[in-house]
Image (tube, grey):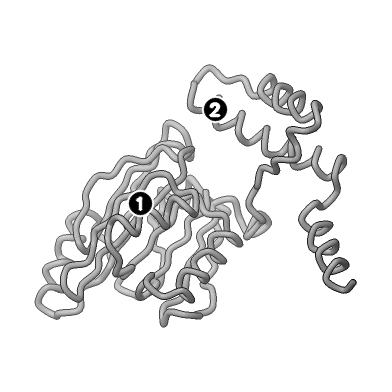
Amino acid sequence: MIILAWNCKGLGQPFAIRELKALVRDSSPDILIMMEAKISNVVMKARLQRLRFDKSVYVPPVSLSSGPCVAWRNEVDLETVSVSKNLISCLIFSDPFFTPWMLSAVYGLVRSAEKIIFWNELHKVDSVIRAKLNRCIANVEWWGLFPITDVKILPQMSSDHSPIVLNSYGCSNFLKRPFRFEAIWTSNKRSHWVVDHSQANAYHSHPSTRLSKHLFQTRRGLSVWNREQFGKIQTIIKETRKAIAAC
């Protein structure tokens, strides 16, 4: 599982939107966590849908304060447990299956009095709490589930907060290009065979596991077939456009 977290300091400006698109494109996250988006619920949903995040929970801004947002793909089995202006807690069921774990997106308070109360409430959830900006914190049990997890703190760009990318698959699988379906594939009948063949090799007794395996096998099968059938199509398109522009 890949999780992207970022305090964007406002998604109302074009440069912030461009940076978010680039972060999502480069990291291909399953779950997106954002803080201080400072936009309405309607605008947030529209922008998340354009990024192919079908489900989300968002605390819209009140006055100058803007709450957290957690968005996730359809294939992620996630259930929200608690939602407030400073904390969204969720249970993740899909990775790994049959071993749910808690994910909490924390947006720290600014006022000292409120901050003390807030951290005391967090201590009721977990006895070990560390306060530090732009960090991922996990307990021993979680690390036992994902022992090769890698975390990248990315450079600051439009915001004064660094984006964080957590990859439970390890650094060898870090920041891969996301899978994209190409419409041209449907013009070749072999693409249908690739999909059918991938489905046949993804049997599992549990329906959600079977669907997850089917999607994984299909993505991998189509990616391999695409390289053999069409080559690197996006590279070919770019080179063709350059050639046309040079004429």
**Residue for badge 1:** 103
Which quadrant of the figure has residue 159?
bottom left
Residue at image position (34%, 75%) is 132
Q: Nearer the viewer, mark 2 or mark 1?
A: 2
**In this view, 228 is above or below 154:** above
Residue at image position (83%, 45%) is 227
Image disc number at residue 215: none
Q: Amino acid at mark 2?
A: Leu
Residue at image position (41%, 75%) is 13
Residue at image position (53%, 60%) is 24
**SS category of the residue bearing label 1:** strand
Q: Position of residue 245 (x, y in %)?
A: 83, 71
Q: Amino acid at mark 1?
A: Leu
Asked whether the beta carbons under mark 2 and mark 1 sit within 8 Å of each other, the answer is: no
Distance from disc 2 to disc 1, alpha carbons, whole Å, reads 23 Å
Which quadrant of the figure has residue 203?
top right
Q: Position of residue 111 (x, y in %)?
A: 15, 79
**Residue for badge 2:** 211
Could you tell me which quadrant the C terminus lies in?
A: bottom right
* Position of residue 79 in the picture relative to residue 203 (left or right): left
* Position of residue 33 in the picture relative to residue 177 (left or right): left
